Image (spheres, helix red, strand yellow):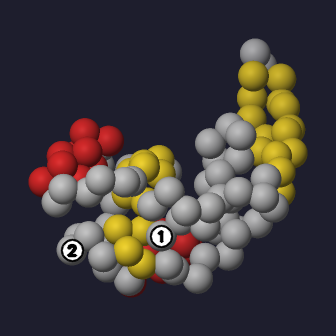
Amino acid sequence: MYFLITMHTKPRFYDHTCQQILPELDYIESLTKTFIHNGEIRTVKLSSTNFMSSENDWMVACPRKAIEQLRELGIHPFKTKNEAREFAKLKQLDSFRYLKI
């Protein structure tokens, strides 16, 4: 899923009317990811002072809780990047980027 966001360091999210909303999300500076690669368990610690890690992980304490908070504010995701792009084009948004979750 994709959200349309502003270019700010702490991004604002666009709602369905194209209003910019700055939710109070619990951003974190580090996160630990564990995954299996070639049959081995790997653990990687990521850190960032930005809202995204260098590996494109959304740096919030709990993504599910953050998504629920966005929904409560009327900010809904698009299923595909193309849907988000078409909406931005329809609403004539000049400056935006995509947040892939």
Mark 2 nearby-residue class (10 Å; few <14, some 14–19, many ≥20): few
The answer to whether residue 57 is left or right of residue 38 is: left
- When the figure is inspected, residue 42 is found, relative to residue 12, above or below; the finding is above
Classify residue 8 by image quadrant: bottom right
Q: Residue at x 79, y 53 (%)?
A: 48
The image shows residue 5 at horizontal and vertical percentages of: 43, 60
Which residue is painted at 82% across and 46% down in the image? 46
Q: Disc 2 marks which residue?
A: 17
Along the line of sight, the residue nearer the viewer: 32 or 92: 92
Q: Residue furthest left?
A: 90
Task: Judge the density around disc 1: few (<14), some (14-19), many (≥20) Cα neighbours within 10 Å.
Answer: some
Q: Which residue is mark 1?
A: 12
Image vertical order of residue 32 relative to residue 65, above or below: above
The residue lying toward the viewer, choosing from 91 and 57, is 91
Instruction: Give the x, y percent position of residue 91.
Output: 16, 60
Is residue 31 at least partly visible in the picture?
A: no
- Residue drawn at 42 percent across, 49 percent down: 98
In the picture shown, does residue 46 fall above or below 62? above
Give the quarter of the image for residue 10.
Answer: bottom right
- Work out how far the residue at label 2 is from the one at label 1, CA to CA, in angstroms: 14 Å
Place of residue 62 in the rendered image (x, y in percent of width and height, measured from the top left): 65, 68
